Amino acid sequence: MKHLKFFSLLLGALFSWSSSFAQIQADWYLTLDSCRSVTNTSAVHAGKAPLTQAYQGEGVIVGIIDGGLQYNHPAFRDNNGQLRIRKVWDFDENGKPIVLSDPQAILARKFSYGSCYGFATTNHASHVAGIAASSGRYKGMAPASEIIFADFIIPMERDSLVFVFQRQLIKCIRDMYAYADSVGKPIVINISLGQNIGFSTELAALQKEFETLTSPGHILLSSAGNEGNVKEAAHYLNSGTNTSAEAVLSIMPVPMANKLYVRSADSVELALTVPAEQKEAYQTSYVRLPDAPDGKKVYRLDITSKAAPAQAPFRIVVNANGKSPFEYFTLLCSIAASNTPGCTISNDYSVGIPASYPNVIAVANYAVEGSEMKMADASSWGPTWDGRNKPDVTAVGSVISAGNYYSPENTHDVLEAYPMDGKDSLETWCGQFGTSQASPMMAGIVALWLQANPKLTPEDIFTVINKTAKPLEQIPNNKSGAGMVDAYAGLLEVLKLPQAIDNLSLHQPEGVRFAVEGQTLHALGAEHGTIRVYDLSGRLVAQGTLRAGHFSLQGVNSGIYAVQLNTGDAKTTGSTLIRIQ
């Protein structure tokens, strides 16, 4: 398999993988314990009233499409020491695809391909998976969920990287859905990577295909990107009232096309001034694309290397002349400057793909500094190429979570480290920052909501977010979406749970496990007592006597109900939620 040789160079320009900022003070990072508190996930884990049970992601699959996972990290085992990673799509040492589902085989491998054999070895997936689903020293958002993982490697295909990326991503998603369907469980997939392409009507067909990839119990989330307030690498220019303007592009010196997209009501002529030493090394092409949704014309300028890549970007000057004002959007290259009065340069339209797609929940990140919560400067913002608001929601993006480095001597960003069996393994906890961290936090919270209702659709989740998130600014907006996620308020909305039901205990009975089979409720651990069943509006729908641990639900429709058990003993008296299929 031929992979991207210039992976480390392309990483920041193409993908929204979070960077690890060694210069950030350790006290800027929140532990997962603090993150659970800030997002109100602790209340969900505790089953805070009016919840009648705790939620930690049981029976839900969390899929991670990413690079670099330490399979034997304690964060991914249950309380009995059993591996919670159910299946992985990986590559062997020679880059050949492999699929593993045997726990011992996964543990024996220790690290994924991206951890120790790729061009840029990474712990990114470990950190991401730890936030969503760690059950180790620090617990993630859904510590009882099951984990599946695909190590994301992109084969090299010149001039078609966007489409290769998408095809590979779609295959990973479908593989994960097939597994979830085979075991009959809901799944939420986190994609903490993406391509920072702000505007292209070429995306329409891919967007339409992506919209077929979600359904009840099949949810996709993605990091919005880290291309927000990055002044030295802007990707959007608006000419204002100008019909002519000059701009300076910073060109990535790689063997694939730097792309400049132009949107205008009329045609636009471009004149390029290229450094003399680069004139023979690059070729250009200029094509018209399908019109934008607003009816404006869209053009694409490709600037492609014909020679070996240089070590640093170089700059070219673009002079545009048209009959109407125009806009620039870039991929790979960036807009370094413009000396034309009235032009504005920003990172509007910087939410990447797939986060910008309608059915994908796009997650921005905010920082917590003392008691202040504010949007992180680098978090990407919208709108999308077809005019929709993005991102959808925001979560904490400066987090201490699980991480590995194949070489134990490499302590970059490692804030805590503990010995493990094997000289090439350490239990490390690292600080990393970005939308890559915010997205799995939201994914783990969605897993808690799926535990309560496995049939949730993306539309359901958008509704919950919009009703329960805490706005950081006027909404709707293109920076923080609906605002900061509130896991507990969201779960109450998912369950349509009232603040109280008369005569309902707000704790679970000790030593009693409830199960529903057909039209029969089993209270395992309780032989006798009285049962009352309420719908979530508080209406009593059934009551009677528990006989030998069984109670008939004949005539009760499918749905979620609150059950009150009274045994005469304080320990075994209490309530829970049940689902009738």
Image: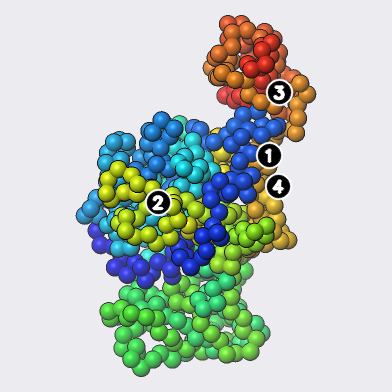
Of marks 1 and 3, which one's residue comes earlier in the chain?
1
Label 1 crowd (10 A; few <14 / some 14-19 / many >=20): some
Residue at left offset 58%, top offset 49%? 35
State which mark lies toward you, 4 or 2: 2
| Picture quadrant where residue 13 is located | bottom left
Work out whether mark 4 precedes mark 1 in sequence or the reverse, and give the earlier one.
4
C-alpha gap between disc 1 and disc 2: 39 Å
Element under disc 4? helix
* Residue position for label 3: 505
The disc label shown at residue 467, or none: 4
Cα distance between the residues tagged 4 and 3: 27 Å
* Mark 4 and mark 3 residues within 8 Å of each other at the beta carbon: no
Question: Residue 506, how many percent across, how many down?
Answer: 69, 27
Q: Give left or right: position of 381 versus 570.
A: left
Q: Amino acid at mark 3?
A: Ser
Q: CA distance from mark 4 to mark 2?
A: 40 Å
Disc on the earlier residue, 4 or 2: 2
Look at label 4 and name its amino acid. Lys
Question: Would you place residue 200 above or below residue 445 in this image?
Answer: below
Find out whether the residues at labels 1 and 3 contact each other: C-beta distance under 8 Å.
no
In the foreground, 35 or 521: 35
Judging from the image, what secondary structure is the residue with disc 2 in?
A: strand
Counting residues from the start of the chain, the first of labels 1 and 2 encountered is 2
**Residue 178 placed where, x, y %?**
40, 39
Residue linked to disc 1: 493
List the residue tagged with mark 2: 417
